[in-house]
Image (cartoon, grey):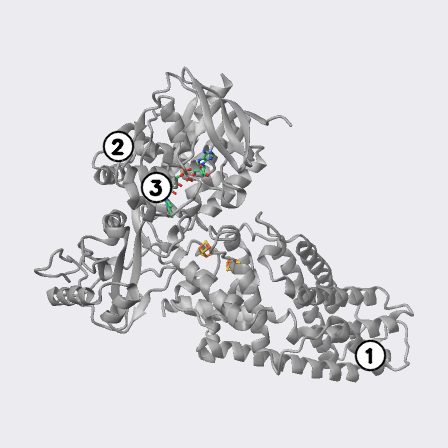
Amino acid sequence: MQPLSNLIAEGERLMVICNACRYCEGYCAVFPAMERRLNFSETDLNYLANLCHNCAECYYSCQYAPPHEFAVNVPQVFAQIRARSYQNYAWPGFVRVGAWWAVTAGIIVAAWLAGARSAAGANFYAVISHEAMVATFAFVSAFILAAYVAGFLRFWRESGESLARFFQPSTLLQAARDALWLKNLDSHGVGCTYPNQQHSQARRRFHHCTFYGFLLCLASTTVAAAYHSIFGWQAPHAYFSVPVVLGTLGGIGLLIGPVGLYWLKRRRDTAIVDIKQDSMDMSFLALLFLTSLTGLLLLALRETTAMGTLLRIHLGIVLGLFLTLPYGKFVHGIYRSAALVRSVLEASRGKD
Amino acid sequence: MGEQTIEADVVVVGGGNAALCAALVARESGVSVTVLESAPVEYRGGNSRHTRNMRCMHETPTNVLTDAYIEDEYFSDLLRVTEGNTAENLARLVIRDSPQAIQWMKSYGVRFQPSLEGTLHLSRTNAFFLGGGKALMNAYYAAAHQRGIRVLYNAEVTELHIRDGKFKSGRLLLNGQPAEFRAKALVAASGGFESNLEWLEEVWGEAARNFIIRGTPYNKGKLIKLLMGQGAESVGDPKQCHAVAVDGRAPKFDGGIVTRLDCLPLGIVVNKRAERFYDEGQDLWPKRYAIWGRLVAEQADQIAWSIIDSKVMGRFMPSVFPPIPAASIRDLALALALPAQDLEATVREFNLAVRPGRFDHQILDDCRTEGLNPPKSHWAQAIDLAPFYGYPLRPGITFTYLGVKVNERAEVQGLGSRTNVFAAGEIMAGNVVGKGYLAGLGMTIGVVFGRIAGREAARAAAQ
Ligand SMILES: Cc1cc2nc3c(=O)[nH]c(=O)nc-3n(C[C@H](O)[C@H](O)[C@H](O)COP(=O)(O)OP(=O)(O)OC[C@H]3O[C@@H](n4cnc5c(N)ncnc54)[C@H](O)[C@@H]3O)c2cc1C
Ligand code: SF4
Ligand code: SF4
């Protein structure tokens, strides 16, 4: 990576050019936010970079893009600044957790919890007890949550806005709409210029598959947990029960989404990205895909003798995924959403 | 290896807005079309690449334009700025066709900024391209590619062979190699001569060496010369150009919009001798910015400085180069290499002449000087709040006026009756704006006449 000061100086140089030009102001939330400023400090740049969705429109339509001597490339420089900012905000510090390490650790934990037990007939809790599962995931989830909250608070503190403002309903609602709809990758209905200069909705759709797939899987787990603790209904659930349907749909989304995003990544124009982040992106996509694949396999083969092994692997991968969540690609969602809230807030107030 | 020969029903020379409009329309009727663009692909699109909007007539609000801007108002604006230097039939053609032009552009994937978005550019008279001129050009080129139009880059036309008004063939440099091209009809859409430094020097003398060319380095006016050499009638004053004051640190070519400076009316402007030379507050800035190129060009060494104080910082559109700061007028003079005592005297004299008033840079306010020559009629405020700032100014040429005369069918006049040579865009804009300028008219002329030229060239080629 470039030394931080160079990177920040480059970001500032670009924003000064863009602010004198403003031709891109109709594309996304970044340019209106830029226009509200005259100077660009490191914290301003961290904010703007996290607001950028890397849609690349402003690169292809820039009359100053390389080889022009002004060499304006906003998406690439912002991607680099973004990667840096993840490290700044991460709590307790940014530990780069390799996907393989995380999965190996996860599987070891799962295997340890399971011991030598085996079972058939989809009797998951005979392999790993319900209490052990709940305790492990509760502990990991609490840690992740703490890490996210800390990261978010660090990001938000830089905005100089109070927390109450973050929770202002109208602002929050508008920002949520922008985030959930991926408005900034939509470019007024035609999609973004990724993987190349042609507009396409592909990235947005695959991201939707991934994100909503993930949410459905979370919902499935939550419903199953509620079934267990409130009604005493234990897994395995019937194929057409709520948790299984949610999990299956989510799982399908999590197969299609990451594969699609990977496929686009292979074809993208490397001029607009920070290729140094590829390993981080790839391990996230791979873990999501494997989580879903092993989950669906477990569902399909839950009546067979392979169940015990599959369960260990699946839980191991899920644990691995969770371990990487606070220190991998997943964090982009936290900071980008917070940046969207900040931009809605600023816009509603007009010029500072 | 033999020399390459390029053949097509219609050949369009140029790669900007007018050229691509002509090419796309000609292709609509099924003829084969080749575009010869002298720039490499990265710099395709001429000055059109640097634009941001076009002026359009409309009777009711649209999703990209507010309120109404009717034909008569548009035409009277044009009469005013050109002082009557316009061919009314062609001007009205441009104005009347402008609403259809927008629709046609949209059908080729060009996108406009919704008029409700963005607080700055809510606009009544001009429609803004979403993403600016390069986004516009990208949309045209993508459409051309899809429709089987051949585009050759690094293709500079150097000769035209026209006999009895009929174009038969021409020569070009293709990637530096001489080649030939043949066509049944020709569209000349190759812009003005603003980037031809020798030509500029012929017209303006040595002063031209200090001019900055705001747009593409590829508009050398070759086709204007070639066509005039074949008898084409010219229009537009060869000694006129549209020039604004740009930051003196701008690159020689292609600096585009970001080098313009809007702070001039908020302070004073001095020349090398640290003397003021023109009323900085004569009229609202959008009406006056285009006289400052010439004013600076008339000063010694074609340089001047805009001087402001901290009071007005943040009140004008930021520009790309930072102002040069100083704690006192004396230090500022040293930093700008101006005679210090003279600058101090000029500022002192100016400050003493400032009359009290209510400052408002959005309107013609009552802040003016008294007993000063030249006066400052509006926005005159004492320059007394440190730090002080200076921006160096140079004349920045936007475009030239000289071009070829055309009729309503875009036929180049003077070559012979029913010629198969057509012209569109900057190369014939002088027919409509012989003098002065209305923001956004250049692109409108390019779309309207580009489409006419494309249609007529296809018709001529089919005969
Ligand atoms: C910074 C800037 C901002 C502007 N903003 C606006 C605006 O917002 N709205 C507006 O209406 N106008 C604007 N203008 C003016 C506008 O750019 C022109 O009116 C318009 O682009 C002219 O279009 P054109 O197609 O005729 O020429 P151009 O777009 O300049 O295209 C000429 C083309 O011809 C090619 N060419 C030249 N010679 C040859 C040759 N011998 N062989 C082959 N190809 C050749 C060039 O490479 C180029 O591609 C602006 C100009 C500048 C410099
Ligand atoms: S990216 Fe280029 S075109 Fe867009 S605002 Fe910045 S300088 Fe202007
Ligand atoms: S890449 Fe897209 S989202 Fe990022 S600044 Fe450019 S236009 Fe905006």
Residue B311 locus on image (x, y percent): 25, 69
| Front position in the image: A50 or A126 | A50
Q: The residue under label 3 is which amino acid type? A: Phe
Answer yes or no: disc 3 within 8 Å of ligand 1: yes
- Kindly indicate the quadrant of the structure image that contains residue B373: bottom left
| Front position in the image: B262 or A106 | B262
Residue A6 locus on image (x, y percent): 52, 69
Mark 1 lies on residue: A108
Q: Nearer the viewer, mark 3 or mark 1?
A: 3
Residue B345 badge: none
Judging from the image, mark 1 belongs to the subunit labelled A
Tell me if residue B117 can be seen: yes
- Kindly indicate the quadrant of the structure image that contains residue A328: bottom right
What crowding class fits label 2: few (fewer than 14 Cα within 10 Å), some (14-19), or many (20 or more)? many
Mark 3 lies on residue: B399
The answer to whether residue B422 is left or right of residue A47 is: left
Say whether mark 1 and mark 3 are on the same chain.
Answer: no
- SS for tag 1? helix
> The N terminus of chain B appears in which quarter of the rendering?
top right
The image quadrant in which ligand 2 is located: bottom left
The answer to whether residue B351 is left or right of residue B439 is: left
Mark 2 lies on residue: B86
Q: The residue under label 2 is which amino acid type? A: Thr
Whichever of callouts 2 and 3 sits on the residue coming sooner in the sequence is 2
Q: The residue under label 1 is which amino acid type? A: Ile
